[in-house]
Image (cartoon, rainbow, N blue to C red):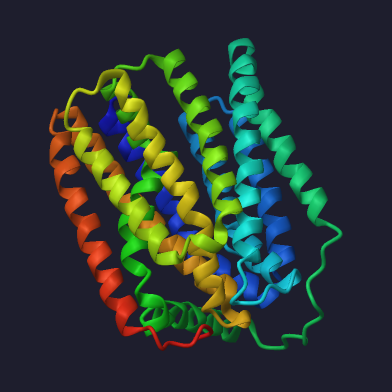
C-alpha cells in the first residue's frame, strides 16, 4: 500500500472510532463506567478474534470497526471510574503520580509485546491478534469485581433516553467553552493531535522511512524509545511537585515543534531523537492533561468531558492522516513540517493568554 492509501485506511478506521467516542462518555456516565469498560474490553477481544481469522478486506474492516468501537467505549470511562473510586482530591498530585506509574507499566508491557509479538509474527501473522484478544478478555475478567455505585432506576422511554443523551453530548461540548476548560483546547487539538498521529498512525511509518530505518531497525528504534520514555516518566513521577502544568505544556510543545522543523533535513540516524521527542512528549503530556481535566470537571459528567477531549484529539488525527499520506507520496511533506510548528506556537500563545485570564477560575467548573 502507498502512504496515501494507508492514510485513507487510517481515516476510515479512526472516523468510526471518532463517531463512537462522544456517546461512549455519555453512556458511561448514565449506565455505569465499570459496566461500559467491561463491555468495551469484550468488544475489543471480539474484534481482534475477527482480525485474527480474517480472509478478506471486508472481514478485516468488520473486525477493526468492532475493535475501535470497543476502544472508544473504554476511552475516558476508565479514568473517570478510577478517579472517583480512589477518591482523589482535585488539588492533589496523587492522580498524576498514579497515572504516570500506569503509563510506565504500560510502556514496559509494550516493549515486551513488541519483542514477543515480532517473534509470533514470524511464525504466523495471525498469532499476535489472537494473543491480543486474550489480553483484552483478561482485562474484562480483572474488572469484573469492580462495581458501579447503586443508582436510581431509569424509567424513561427509549426516545426520551436518546434525547437526554444527545443533550448531554451538547452540554459536554458547551462545557469545553467555559473559561476553565477552553484554555486546554489548543493543546489538545494541535499538540496531542500531532502526538496521536506520531504514535498510532501513518506519521510514525513516514518518519521511520524518512530517516532511512528499515523495518528491523525501526523495531529497535521504537523499543529503545519506549524504554527511555519509561525513564522520563520515572523522573516526572519523582519530581511531580516541581513540574507545574504550564511548564510541562510549554516544554513538551516547544520540543515537538523543534523536532518537526529538524525533520525537514535529512537527519539519517539522528532522526531517532525526533521520534523519541514525539513519543516521550505524548506520554509526558497525558498525565498532566488528565489531571487538569479531571480536577476541573464535575464528577457526574467526568466521563463525558474526557470523551470530548479524546474526540478533539482524534479529530486532528483523522484530518491529518490523508494529508500526511498525500504530502509524503508527492514528496511535499516539508509543507507540513513547516506549518505545524507555527500552529504549535499559536496554541502555546492562546493557552498562556487564556491561562492568565483564568487565574481566578474555580477548579470544578
Q: Residue furthest right?
A: 145
What residue lies at 65% left-to-right and 21% top-to-bottom? 116
What residue lies at 14% left-to-right and 44% top-to-bottom? 338
41 sits to left or right of 146: left
Looking at the rendered image, the quarter that the N terminus falls into is top left
Q: Is residue 300 above or below residue 293?
A: below
Q: Nearer the viewer, residue 274 or 50?
A: 274
What residue lies at 49% left-to-right and 38% top-to-bottom? 61
Residue 77: quarter of image:
bottom right
Residue 183: quarter of image:
bottom left
Q: Nearer the viewer, residue 303 or 27?
A: 303
Tally the numbered discs.
0
Q: Position of residue 155 (x, y in %)?
A: 72, 88
Q: Is residue 331 above or below residue 269?
A: below
Q: Is residue 204 visible?
A: yes
Q: Is residue 240 above or below residue 279?
A: below
109 sits to left or right of 272: right
Q: Position of residue 18 (x, y in %)?
A: 44, 57
137 sits to left or right of 79: right
Q: Nearer the viewer, residue 176 or 253?
A: 253
Q: Position of residue 165 (x, y in %)?
A: 54, 79
Residue 125: quarter of image:
top right
Q: Position of residue 213 (x, y in %)?
A: 35, 17
What residue lies at 38% left-to-right and 83% top-to-bottom? 359
Q: Is residue 27 above or below residue 160?
A: above
Amino acid at each position: 500500500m502507498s502512504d496515501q492509501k494507508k492514510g485513507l485506511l487510517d481515516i476510515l478506521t479512526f472516523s468510526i472510532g471518532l463517531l463512537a467516542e462522544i456517546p461512549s462518555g455519555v453512556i458511561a456516565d448514565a449506565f455505569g463506567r465499570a459496566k461500559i469498560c467491561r463491555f468495551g474490553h469484550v468488544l475489543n477481544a471480539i474484534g481482534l478474534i475477527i482480525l485474527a481469522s480474517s480472509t478478506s478486506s471486508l472481514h478485516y474492516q468488520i473486525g477493526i470497526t468492532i475493535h475501535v468501537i470497543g476502544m472508544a467505549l473504554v476511552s475516558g470511562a476508565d479514568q473517570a471510574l478510577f478517579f472517583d473510586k480512589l477518591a482523589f482530591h482535585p488539588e492533589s498530585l496523587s492522580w498524576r503520580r498514579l497515572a504516570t506509574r500506569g503509563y510506565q507499566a504500560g510502556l514496559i508491557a509494550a516493549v515486551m509485546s513488541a519483542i514477543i509479538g515480532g517473534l509470533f509474527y514470524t511464525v504466523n501473522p495471525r498469532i499476535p491478534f489472537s494473543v491480543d484478544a486474550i489480553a483484552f478478555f483478561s482485562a474484562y475478567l480483572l474488572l469484573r469485581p469492580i462495581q458501579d455505585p447503586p443508582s436510581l432506576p431509569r424509567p424513561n422511554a427509549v426516545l426520551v433516553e436518546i434525547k437526554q443523551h444527545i443533550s448531554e453530548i451538547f452540554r459536554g461540548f458547551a462545557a469545553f467553552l467555559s473559561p476553565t476548560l477552553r484554555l486546554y483546547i489548543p493543546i489538545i487539538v494541535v499538540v496531542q493531535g500531532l502526538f496521536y498521529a506520531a504514535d498510532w498512525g501513518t506519521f510514525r511509518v513516514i518518519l521511520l522511512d524518512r530517516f532511512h530505518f528499515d523495518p528491523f531497525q525501526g523495531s529497535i528504534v521504537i523499543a529503545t524509545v519506549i524504554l527511555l520514555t519509561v525513564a522520563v516518566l520515572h523522573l516526572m513521577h519523582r519530581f511531580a511537585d516541581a513540574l507545574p502544568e504550564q511548564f510541562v505544556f510549554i516544554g513538551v510543545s516547544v520540543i515537538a515543534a523543534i523536532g518537526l522543523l529538524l525533520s525537514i533535513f535529512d537527519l539519517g540516524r539522528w532522526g531517532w531523537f525526533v521520534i523519541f521527542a514525539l513519543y516521550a512528549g505524548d506520554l509526558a503530556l497525558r498525565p498532566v492533561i488528565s489531571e487538569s481535566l479531571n480536577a476541573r470537571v464535575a464528577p457526574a459528567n467526568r466521563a463525558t468531558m474526557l470523551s470530548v477531549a479524546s474526540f478533539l484529539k482524534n479529530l486532528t488525527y483523522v484530518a491529518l492522516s490523508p494529508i500526511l499520506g498525500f504530502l509524503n507520496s508527492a514528496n511535499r511533506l516539508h509543507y507540513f513540517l513547516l506549518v505545524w510548528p507555527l500552529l504549535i506556537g499559536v496554541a502555546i500563545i492562546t493557552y498562556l493568554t487564556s491561562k492568565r485570564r483564568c487565574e481566578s477560575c474555580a477548579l470544578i467548573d
